[in-house]
Image (cartoon, helix red, strand yellow):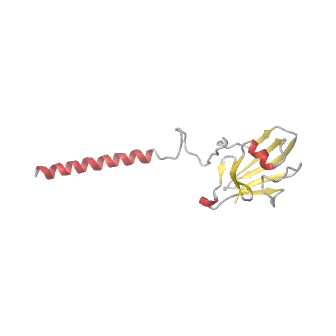
Amino acid sequence: MQMKHNRKVLTCILCMALIVAMAFSTVGCNGSKNGEAASGAEGTEAGADVQREGGELGEGSMEFALTVTDKDGNETRFQIHTDKKTVGEALQELNLIDGEEGEYGLFVKTVNGITADYDTDGVYWAFYVNDEYATSGVDVTEITEGDSYALKVE
């Protein structure tokens, strides 16, 4: 009889310990790092982990307009100043874009702190020149004064 009672007590203690352990593990899994609150925008390894609100960026003799459109249709407009030759170089220098080098050049994965992951969500960053889908990648498209450029999640 005493052995049966000890077994019940031990079972209750183990159940309580498991409940407490599960509570602590779920509270600790909010996805943030270093005590920061989790946000909807993922950062990049290049340091552009904060989403910018638009405006004038960079320094240089060449200037172009860039519009960034997220998956919800929210637009952020930038006026980029640079001495770089291509749109991709200018945007990488300002930490506005990040991606992976692939067979066809730079595959842009993050723009203005927002990551579009085709493998996970089925969306990607599309590149436009003067409101038309670009025929070349952002990393090889030369900056043309007066042209406008856009990156949109599609």
Image side of residue 79 versus residue 27, left or right? right
- Image point 78% across, 40% down: which residue? 57
- The outermost residue toward the front is 103
Query: What is the x, y in percent for residue 82?
Result: 83, 41
Please state if 138 lies on the left or on the right of 146 as rendered: left
Which residue appears farthest toward the left when viewing the image? 1
Q: Position of residue 48 (x, y in %)?
A: 67, 42
User: Residue 84 sits in which quadrant?
Assistant: top right
| Quarter containing the C terminus | bottom right
In the displayed structure image, the side of residue 30 where residue 97 appears, left or right: right
Q: Please, is residue 63 above or below residue 150 in the view?
A: above
Q: Position of residue 28 (x, y in %)?
A: 45, 44
Near-viewer residue (3 or 114): 3
Residue 134 lies in what quarter of the image? bottom right
How many numbered marks have been drawn onto this rendered protein structure? Answer: 0
Q: What is the x, y in percent for residue 153?
A: 69, 57
Measuring 39% from the left and 47% from the top, which residue is drawn there? 23
- Residue 84 versus residue 150 in the image, above or below: above
Q: Which of the pair 25/54 is nearer the observer?
A: 25
Residue drawn at x 79%, y 39% as measured from the top left: 58
